[in-house]
Amino acid sequence: MPKLSAVVIARDDAHLVRSAVSSVSFADEVLVVDSGTTGEVERVCAPFGARVLKIAVPGVESPVRWATAQAMHDWILCIGTNEVATPELGAAVRELLASGEPNCPAYRARDVNVFMGRPLSRGLIFRRSSLRLFDRRRFEWSGPGAPPGDAGLLPGMVLHFEVPDAASAIADMNTRSSLEAIQIALSGVVLGGFAILFAAFLQFLRTFVGSGNFRNGFPGLAWSFIDAVGSATTYMKARELVAGGDSARRGVEGRQLIRRSDSGRAHRGAHGLACKGISD
């Protein structure tokens, strides 16, 4: 029976580390990658027998790939600090490895956001999955979003707690809209007021109705509304950036014109005094 090493990428919140490590405690080995957190990671992980690996050299491209080389076993299960493997996923992994060497070199698991205390597990949003389990002898980790074509799909889910409430979702939306607005502003394409409103309405329909988020109750409604507001905010910020750039250009051109005008007046004034002196 192949043995399993679980890798958890640590962040600052100690209570999140505890939840993540606890959810993968069924593994034969648990590695926690600490790349410079400010929390008490070792103290939190000690009751679970987890081994904490501190990255001494900053700028490691992939902490998971680095930790994989430190693992005792070839099969690797990977989650983040703000994630939790469900009991169903744990049971599926144990059953898979108990049956002998798995056929696939890697396996995916469904990703589900937990928002307002409820997993958004219904609708098209539930169909997202990412790479979670792999054999390091046959597969090289390049990120959770890049599973091979022959990757299997495991029962169970990985729950995400990155934006668990409305406040964090709005803060996340504000950050993302600022970044996306820069790209839109650089393209020079901006929308008018009614177009922005219509784009937000369409985004709400896509998320709430088209993706089936209405099946997730009030949290699904709130998630879809914040997503639609984010779409409108992005276009408004892009328009503001373009308008600010135009104003800045007009300001620079105006200052250059004033300097040229002042220079001309100074030249004409000096020329007039000279002419007057000659005439006298």
Image: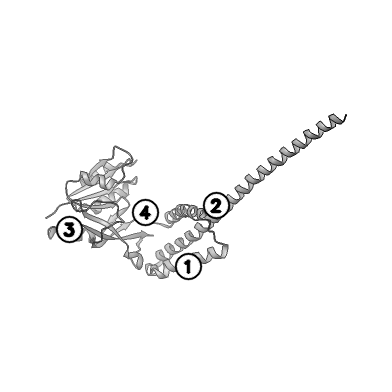
In the rendered structure, which amino acid carries the disc numbered 3?
Arg
Q: Earlier in the sequence, mark 3 or mark 2?
A: 3
> In which image quadrant can residue 121 be found?
bottom left
Q: CA distance from mark 4 to mark 1?
A: 26 Å
User: Residue 162's mark?
Assistant: 4
Can you give x and y, in whole percent of width and height, for residue 186 in the image? 51, 53
Residue at the spot of label 1: 202
Mark in front: 3 vs 2: 2
In the rendered structure, which amino acid carries the disc numbered 1?
Leu
> Taking the image as drawn, is residue 44 in sight?
no
Secondary structure beneath label 4: loop
Front in this rendered view, residue 264 or 44: 264
Q: Label 3: how many residues lie within 10 Å, few (<14), some (14-19) or many (20+)?
A: some
> In which image quadrant can residue 151 be found?
bottom left
Residue at the spot of label 3: 94
> Taking the image as drawn, is residue 98 in sight?
yes
In the rendered structure, which amino acid carries the disc numbered 4?
Glu
Q: CA distance from mark 2 to mark 1?
A: 23 Å
Residue at the spot of label 2: 241
Residue 132 sits above or below residue 248 on the image? below
Can you give x and y, in whole percent of width and height, for residue 74 in the image? 17, 50
Secondary structure beneath label 2: helix
Front in this rendered view, residue 209 or 276: 276
Mark in front: 4 vs 1: 1
Can you give x and y, in whole percent of width and height, for residue 123 in the image? 35, 68
For the residues bearing labels 3 and 4, Cβ distance under 8 angstroms:
no
